[in-house]
Image (spheres, rainbow, N blue to C red):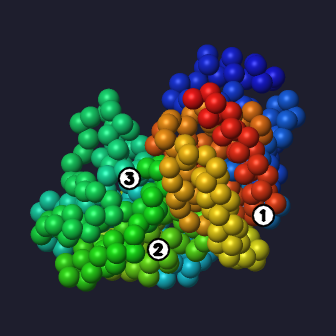
Amino acid sequence: MTGEEVLKCGEEYLMQTYSRSPLVPVKGRGARVWDVSGRCYLDFLSGIAVNSVGHCHPRVVAAIREQAGELLHCSNLYWSGPQVKLARELARLSGLDRAFFCNSGAEANEAAIKLVRKYGYEHGKTCPEIVTFTNSFHGRTLGTLAATGQEKFSKGFTPLPGGFRHIPFNDVEALRGAVTPETVAILVEPVQGEGGVYPATPEFMAALGEIRAAHGVLLVYDEIQCGLGRTGKMFAFEHYGVRPDVLVLAKALGGGLPIGAIVARDGVANPFQPGSHGSTFGGNPVACAAALAVLQVIREESLVEKAEQVGWYFKRRLEELKGRFQLIREVRGCGLMLGIELDRPGKELVALCEERGLLVNCTAEYVLRFLPPLIIGMDEVDEAVSILAEALQEFRKAC
């Protein structure tokens, strides 16, 4: 199909749940993708932090091919070697103990919500409550919409499930005042992604640890977007030294295949017993094989360290642009999870970058977000910054 045919057919047969660019990618290698007409783009979005080791990394593709030729699916009525190996590796990396697998980030957060609620009931709480934060994003199921601290996502889908209390992010005083005898857990993104690339402050994360010690409240970290090397550490919580009781992962884990996971410490994982939760496709052998290959690539190619080094350089280059363009209010983020806040909506700037061969996106309406693959180098950062500067010049004139 031509690009025009894809657009026409999609408009006729797909539910219109996405505001899509007319771009139709058909091939990806490393940090670049090609559209249906053969034009090449530098990808600084990575499928929204999914293709963290680049498009079609040879090791990931080889792992998928090998597993697909052996066993595509066996259900969780039986043991699966790739699933068990992946659980062991995630436990080793996180310092936690047991994993549960599903198919997406929203499903993983849903599982975490169910787990801590069951934990709460088993520890004497009559109506377990979870504290979450304004500007957060945890998914699009009804449960995760209720946890999300942005009303725009839940508009038209009420009534939502109860049991959540939203307080301001990075507000230590509000955090201390939010805990009640019914509080079972605090669900937080160490770096808010969809909310506009806002890292938690060290003081805020330290307060989380103090509250857990004082009240026995569980800490659930949503690292769906900021985990697995994205911030220059394997997990974003490592920047703060406050380990979670439950860690939520997805996006980058499968290298492009759908997989989500929660990893919990032993005592917290215990409420999940046979029949309490499940997923038909969760822990699929092919997805787990891909995830194991992703983790191997991250380790052997030192991509966490690279994300820290290149991310520091990229942030410095963005700060240079801020000095040239007054419409840039702030540069935020860490590692290769960066954003520039604009003084006006950024949708048109995204389009101007795309026209010049750079893929980025705008979140929270005013924040241009950068999530390049962890394999990105400084030369490609320079290329992206050059394109962005040209786009900013035109954007400034047009607005």
Q: What number is the disc on residue 136?
A: 3
Residue with the mark numbered 2: 237
Image coords of residue 363 (percent x, y): 51, 43
Mark 2 surroundings within 10 Å by alpha-carbon count, few (fewer than 14), some (14 through 19), many (20 or more) = many
Frontmost of labels 3 and 1 is: 1
Q: What element carries label 2?
A: helix
Q: Is mark 3 on a helix, strand or loop?
A: loop
Q: Which amino acid does label 1 sit on?
A: Gly
**Mark nearer the N terminus (2 vs 1):** 2
**Residue visible at 31% across and 56% down in the picture:** 133
Q: Quadrant of the N terminus?
A: top right
The residue nearer to you, when weighing 302 against 252, is: 302
Q: Quadrant of residue 118?
A: bottom left
Q: In which quarter of the image is residue 323?
A: bottom right
Q: In which quarter of the image is residue 126?
A: bottom left
**Mark nearer the N terminus (2 vs 3):** 3
Image coords of residue 167 (percent x, y): 25, 56
Image coords of residue 84 (percent x, y): 58, 73
Q: Which amino acid does label 3 sit on?
A: Ser
The residue nearer to you, when weighing 320 against 94, is: 320
- Tag 2–tag 1 contact (CB < 8 Å): no
**Residue visible at 53% across and 61% down in the picture:** 333
Residue with the mark numbered 1: 377
